[in-house]
Amino acid sequence: MVFKSDIEIAQATTMAPIGQIAASIGLTEDELEYYGKYKAKVDYNLLKTKYKDTPNGKLILVTAINPTPAGEGKTTTTVGLGDALHRLGKKVVIALREPSLGPVFGVKGGAAGGGYAQVVPMEDINLHFTGDFHAIGAANNLLAAMLDNHIQQGNALGIDVKQITWKRCVDMNDRQLRHIIDGIGGKMQGVPREDGFDITVASEVMAVLCLASGITDLKERLGRMIVAYTYDGKPVTAHDLKAEGAMTALLKDALKPNLVQTLEGTPTLIHGGPFANIAHGCNSVTATRMALKLGDYAVTEAGFGADLGAEKFLDIKCRLAGLRPSAVVVVATVRALKSHGGVPKAELNHENLDALEKGLPNLLHHVDTIRNTFHLPCVVAVNAFPTDTEAELRLVEDKCRELSVRAVLSEVWAKGGEGGKALAAEVVRLCEEPCPEQPTPEEFTFAYPDNTSLIYKLNAIVNRVYGGAQAVLTPAAQKQAQQLFDLGFGDLPVCMAKTQYSLSDDPTLLGAPEGFTVTVRNLKVSAGAGFIVALTGDIMTMPGLPKVPAAEKIDVDKDGKITGLF
């Protein structure tokens, strides 16, 4: 059977003018800034004016098992769930992360949902969209330029060029830029030094934009960012370089969330931060808060599995922004669980109950984490594939029932919102009915309290979220931990940079390994964002392209029609 590609489905859809979508949730023409017919930015100041006293809707977090080559469909499920809630008569607004160009042209080909559960215009969303990421890159690199210029012009602050922590960035996977030497060619070309690039979405500027509550908070956070240390070990900030004002000017419009729609016309805010394995990995606080004010239900997602995206959403975003989810959806597929059970990708289409049983602990671990570490009610969404058998689906359902959690078949890829009604009904039940078998949102707790040491927080995440034994710090990381404590940053939450493929820091350890340690090789403070980044294993903040990049299949014809985006 031949299926339409994602882009073919999207291009066949007749979109409503974005003003019409905005009007359905109470936004007026004067409150929008149009980017063509089908995209608009929404003024964040509405949260402090028009919607100041509007009660929040229910916050629904969508997360997933550890990803596999078989695919899980987290964004697809998020979009389909929003459409399904809409079909049930609920006033719903979806809040998504924006795709990064690096993986779009590298390994993914696009990240706007899939099948009949997509956000549109998908080509725009997957490519330049409204230019937010370019603004983030420009602000990041302006700071880098001002830093190097300060050193070139006499270095009045006494910056040690061997202790510069700020990197340049570009929104493209490019391993060639990870480690470079720049400033060569003579005195007038700058000061020679080791340098490097991060992918834009791993930049602290991205996290700052996502966590800022407004323009003033944005500027203050930018000013607090540490870019280097002096010869006597004192931190140098963007404020010391007098950079935060100009950076804020570049980011002024990027701070406004972007309004688009699903294939079924459900309002969707897309804004910020896609990478949870190397960064914060959530959409902006502003977009989430706006979705909560504009809808009775706000459906949002966090990056990769619950060990990464959900942990950061709950431990960082909810902690810093005062958010509390009403329910959590954990997405899984039978195919992905069989992959965790050791089945090669080429053999996933065949029924294999033994492999499924071996892989199920990965799902059950994430469910247990949501329920017993964070104390939130949850439901498992089984993203349906035609090759799933009745016996396989029953096994998943039975194992989840043992944890007093329902596993609901989601068919949103094939059927859109209609295929997500059962999932939507369970989400509504968790939010609106007493569920004695589930925790309540009022019981929500973090994986670690605020007033604990950095080592305690690292171990808490490894123990209570990953299921491992402990975090092990390299000698360099131990020294950095002491330095961060001495500088007064010991109380900040932790942002773990870890492989997405395993609960451990070893991508080959699938399923639910036990007794492992997680090696922390580097610790650095993101003082503007308000957390400490812990780099584990061999995770990198600048990915590379695969042997066959997705870019090889992306093209545009003589009429300007794009192909190859999924």
Image: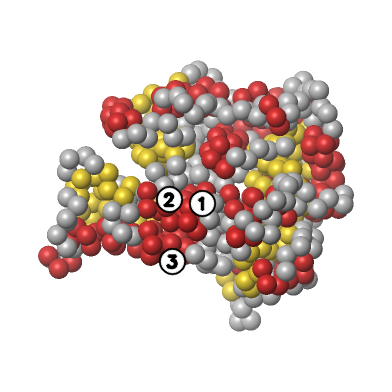
302 sits to left or right of 487? right
N-terminal-most mark, 3 or 1? 1
Closer-to-camera residue (527/304): 527
Picture quarter with the C terminus: bottom right
* Residue 227 drawn at (x, y percent): 31, 49
Residue at image coords 28%, 57%? 241
Closer-to-camera residue (563/302): 302
Q: Residue furthest left?
A: 187
N-terminal-most mark, 2 or 3? 2
* Callout 2: SS: helix
Q: Label 3 vs label 1: CA separation?
A: 15 Å
In the picture, residue 10 is in which quadrant?
bottom right
Residue at image coords 83%, 28%? 434
Relative height, residue 423 to residue 457 (above, below): below
Residue at image coords 66%, 37%? 324
In the picture, residue 533 is in which quadrant?
top left
Q: Residue tagged by mark 1?
A: 212
* Callout 1: SS: loop
Picture quarter with the N terminus: bottom right
Rendered image: mark on residue 221:
2
Q: Residue tagged by mark 3?
A: 249
What amino acid type is highlighted by mark number 2? Arg
What amino acid type is highlighted by mark number 3? Ala
What amino acid type is highlighted by mark number 1? Ala
